[in-house]
Amino acid sequence: MPASQQHDHNHCITTAMDTARSLCEERGLRMTPVRRRVLELVWQNHKPTGAYDLLAQLTEEGFNSAPPTVYRALDFLLELGVVHRISSLNAFVGCDHPGHEHDTGFFICKECGNATELPASEIKKLHETLLKKFGFSIESSNHELTGLCQNCKATS
Amino acid sequence: MPASQQHDHNHCITTAMDTARSLCEERGLRMTPVRRRVLELVWQNHKPTGAYDLLAQLTEEGFNSAPPTVYRALDFLLELGVVHRISSLNAFVGCDHPGHEHDTGFFICKECGNATELPASEIKKLHETLLKKFGFSIESSNHELTGLCQNCKATS
DNA sequence: CGTAAAATTGCAACATTATAACCTAAGGAC
DNA sequence: GTCCTTAGGTTATAATGTTGCAATTTTACG
Ligand SMILES: [Zn+2]
Ligand SMILES: [Zn+2]
Ligand SMILES: [Zn+2]
Ligand SMILES: [Zn+2]
């Protein structure tokens, strides 16, 4: 069962859009139509989506778009902290808990493709251990785990 | 101070090549000239190296090479478990402790560019915690951390 | 208002990374 | 040797991401 059937997904999107808008207001940034639409698309897909997939969706809708349009919008949203990039997939996904800088970590289900963000607390703990034991001063980190999510485990 | 000045780097390379050779023998695989040379180059660079950089080095040396040559060699070496791919850098690096499958984790120094492999034990611990707390059955994982290594911290 | 500066977008070309398809050559089994 | 499998050569192309510049929109300010 895909995650999209387990929760009110429209609520996800609305919340994400609201948060993004207020973050922009706080910081004096502009949530333009392309940026808004890219963020909506990322959330609508609700799983990691490639830049060129987003581009295709935009083009279908009449946004007169070329690669830089999408990448610029994504850069903006990454900077704002409302999307993350999953480098092992060359894909982008909406952030669960935007509004504060945080390291990224994802559990990616190889069955349904959903990417769940790892709790920041676990990542922080790992950082502390590595600093204590090995002297690594970590500035940022990204963690990408794959396996079967609980739902897919149950139904397989 | 780059890591290459802290240790006998030729020893690194020799050891890595020996290990790779015996892994091939054990498994009835062939360590061909291109494969051998790619592995040597990865170790000689001693920091994450892109496929096209390797290709350029091969070409200089008269290997009559095109992208597939390098990617095939890299695929072989990845499969053999003697190199890893760092997806945030689109780059490849020699494995510290080959011979057994393991998840990958790297601490990448943003100053000197060296990538140090994280101890498998820490990664395993993280997996266990995530399984216990959140029910994630992790099949494989990759961790990429950036910051300042101890050497660069000391000299900056 | 009017205008200048800044930010955003459109657009074309390009750069980088990776793969597909097809054929030839080399190595090993019998 | 003959057959079969594996590896490499070659060409083309796919997928992902960037640069540079002109045109437009938005904002700031007198
Ligand atoms: Zn997040
Ligand atoms: Zn799943
Ligand atoms: Zn390793
Ligand atoms: Zn360093």
Image (cartoon, coloured by chain):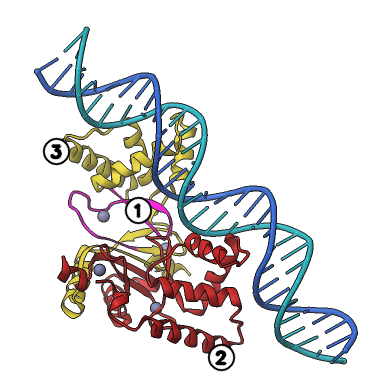
Chain colours: A red, B yellow, C blue, D cyan
Q: Quadrant of ligand 3?
A: bottom left
* Residue A100 in sight: no
The residues tagged by marks 1 and 2 sit, at their Cα atoms, a distance apart of: 39 Å
Please provide percent x and percent y for residue B128. 17, 72
Q: In what element is the residue under mark 2?
A: helix
Q: Chain of mark 2?
A: A
Choose the circle earlier in sequence order: 1 or 3.
Answer: 3
Q: Hey, which quadrant is residue B106 in on the image?
A: bottom left
Crowding near the residue tagged with mark 3, few <14, some 14–19, many ≥20 C-alpha atoms within 10 Å: few
Q: Nearer the viewer, mark 3 or mark 2?
A: 2
Asked if disc 3 is less than 8 Å from ligand 3, the answer is no
Q: Chain of mark 1?
A: B
Disc 1 marks which residue? Answer: B85
| Residue plotted at (18% across, 75% down) | B135
Q: In what element is the residue under mark 1?
A: strand
**Number of the label disc, if any, that sits on residue B26:** 3
| Residue plotted at (23% across, 41% down) | B20
- Taking the image as shown, residue C7 lies to the left or right of residue B128, namely right
Disc 2 marks which residue? Answer: A26
Q: Chain of mark 3?
A: B
Residues indicated by labels 1 and 2 sit on the same polypeptide chain = no
